[in-house]
Image (cartoon, rainbow, N blue to C red):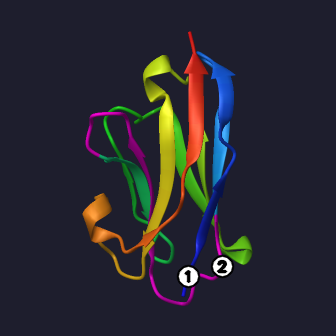
Amino acid sequence: EVELVESGGGLVQAGGSLRLSCAASVFTTDDYTVGWFRQAPGKEREGVSCLTTRSGHTYYSDSVKGRFTISSDLAKNTVYLQMNSLKPEDTTVYYCDADPRIVPCKHEYLVIWGLGSLVTVSS
């Protein structure tokens, strides 16, 4: 069973950068969809960015396009989210989710969930 552990969250000033890491216990030869999701209080969980580990498809929400970059290093079983030009509204817990299929970048489609990493952007 694949387990996911997020790291890299923290406190940063507006305009700054952070890199989140999602380390998987193992990514098999399946083409996984791995994504970063965030959920602010009182809001639905938003798909921020996803990629597929073998076919290389990527997705970005409009709110982060041009600022965030998702990437993977399969030798390390890790998916990254480089976050630049951070804004206070990016503040929330970021979750890494995965699925051993190619699925839409929506939380309800992914069956493996991480515990989250808090990102706080101060103004």
Image vertical order of residue 114 relative to residue 37, above or below: below
Q: What is the residue that sits farthest to the top in this orientation?
A: 123
As rendered, which of 68 and 24 lies closer to the eye? Answer: 24
Which residue does the numbered mark 1 point to in the structure image?
2
Q: Quadrant of the C terminus?
A: top right
Q: Amino acid at mark 1?
A: Val
Considering the numbered disc 1 on the image, is that residue within a helix, a strand or a loop? Answer: loop
In the image, taking residue 122 as reference, residue 66 lies left or right, namely left
**At x 69% / y 45%, what residue is drawn?**
8
Residue drawn 55% across and 81% down? 2
What's the distance in space between the residues labelled 1 and 2, CA to CA?
6 Å
Asked if residue 122 is positioned above or below residue 2 in the image, the reply reads above
Looking at the rendered structure, the kind of residue marked 2 is Ser
Q: Position of residue 63 (x, y in %)?
A: 35, 32
- Queried whether the magenta region covers residue 27, the answer comes back as yes
From the top left corner, tell me how far across and down residue 44 is, in percent: 26, 43
The magenta stretch spans which residues? Answer: 23-44
Report whether residue 96 is seen. yes
Helix or strand or loop: what does disc 2 sit on?
Answer: loop
Mark 1 and 2 residues: CB-CB less than 8 Å, in contact? yes
Looking at the image, tell me whether mark 1 or mark 2 is earlier in sequence order.
Answer: 1
Residue 76 found in image quarter: bottom right
Is 17 magenta? The answer is no
Tag 2 residue: 25
In terms of image quadrants, where is residue 52? bottom left
Left/right placement of residue 24 relative to residue 115 reads right
Query: Residue 57 lies in what quarter of the image?
Result: bottom left
Mark 1: few, some, or many residues within 10 Å (few <14, many ≥20)? few
Image location of residue 83, percent across then percent down = 58, 36
